[in-house]
């Protein structure tokens, strides 16, 4: 027993969930951990897309699979981290921003200006949360944490598709 005869209880943290949920600790960076996670996701996508040299269809498929994989990991991770931190939607869970950002990048060519626009659009939609994103946020645990950002990513994707029609 430590001095004073009391034992301090430590909260248990599930390492894999906290690692994934905070996207390797980015969620613990402040201020604006969601913005930092979105930026990291966009830069990771850009680096991978530049290196892989995929066709447009291949890039869309690769990005979609990556976003789905992150969402599949993020839902249980977000649920666990929310429970262990005692908060419904903890700001340090940012894996949802990664999935949402990658959804926003689905229709992007590998160009910095398009990536930057997808990043900005996603951040705006993630902050504003137009209908039904705000309602999805109310779902329990990691599902609500993840789905509102995927909806924000879908809104950004729609705008990107429209913009790309005129902006090449």
Image (tube, rainbow, N blue to C red):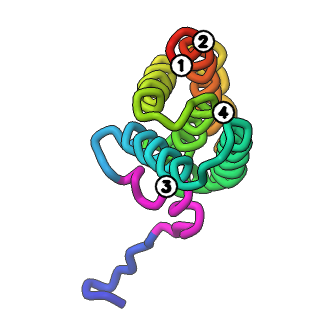
Query: Does the magenta portion include 17?
Result: yes
Q: Is residue 105 above or below residue 124?
A: below
Along the polypeptide, which appears first: circle 3 or circle 2?
3
Classify residue 2 as left or right of residue 105: left
SS for dot 2: helix
Rendered image: mark on residue 165: 2
Residue 56 pos. (x, y %): 67, 36
Q: Is residue 44 above or below residue 158?
A: below
Residue 31 pos. (x, y %): 28, 41
**What crowding class fits label 3: few (fewer than 14 Cα within 10 Å), some (14-19), or many (20 or more)?**
many
Residue 86 visible in the shown view: no
Spatial CA span between label 4 and label 3:
17 Å
Rendered image: mark on residue 129: 1
Q: Are marks 4 and 2 in contact (CB under 8 Å)?
A: no
Along the polypeptide, which appears first: circle 4 or circle 3?
3
SS for dot 3: loop
Q: Are marks 2 and 1 in contact (CB under 8 Å)?
A: no
SS for dot 1: loop
Q: Are marks 1 and 3 in contact (CB under 8 Å)?
A: no
Spatial CA span between label 3 and label 2:
33 Å
Spatial CA span between label 2 and label 1:
25 Å
Q: Which residues, given as a range, are shown in magenta?
A: 11-28
For disc 4, the marked residue is 147
**What crowding class fits label 4: few (fewer than 14 Cα within 10 Å), some (14-19), or many (20 or more)?**
many
Query: Could you tell me which residue is drawn at 44 percent across and 24 percent down?
Result: 117
Query: Could you tell me which residue is drawn at 40 percent across and 41 percent down?
Result: 39
């Amino acid at each position: 027993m430590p001095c004073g005869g009391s034992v301090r209880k430590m909260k248990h943290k599930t390492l894999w969930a906290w690692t994934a949920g905070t996207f390797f600790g980015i969620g613990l960076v402040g201020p604006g951990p969601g913005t930092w996670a979105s930026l990291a996701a966009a830069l990771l996508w850009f680096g991978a897309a530049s290196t892989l040299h995929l066709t447009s269809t291949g890039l869309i498929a690769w990005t979609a699979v990556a976003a789905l994989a992150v969402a599949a990991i993020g839902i249980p991770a977000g649920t666990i981290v929310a429970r262990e931190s005692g908060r419904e939607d903890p700001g340090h869970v940012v894996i949802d921003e990664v999935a949402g950002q990658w959804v926003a990048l689905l229709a992007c060519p590998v160009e910095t200006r398009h990536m930057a626009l997808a990043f900005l659009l996603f951040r705006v939609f993630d902050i504003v949360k137009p209908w039904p994103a705000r309602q999805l946020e109310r779902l329990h645990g990691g599902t609500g944490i993840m789905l509102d950002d995927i909806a924000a990513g879908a809104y950004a994707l729609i705008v990107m598709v429209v913009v790309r029609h005129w902006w090449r």
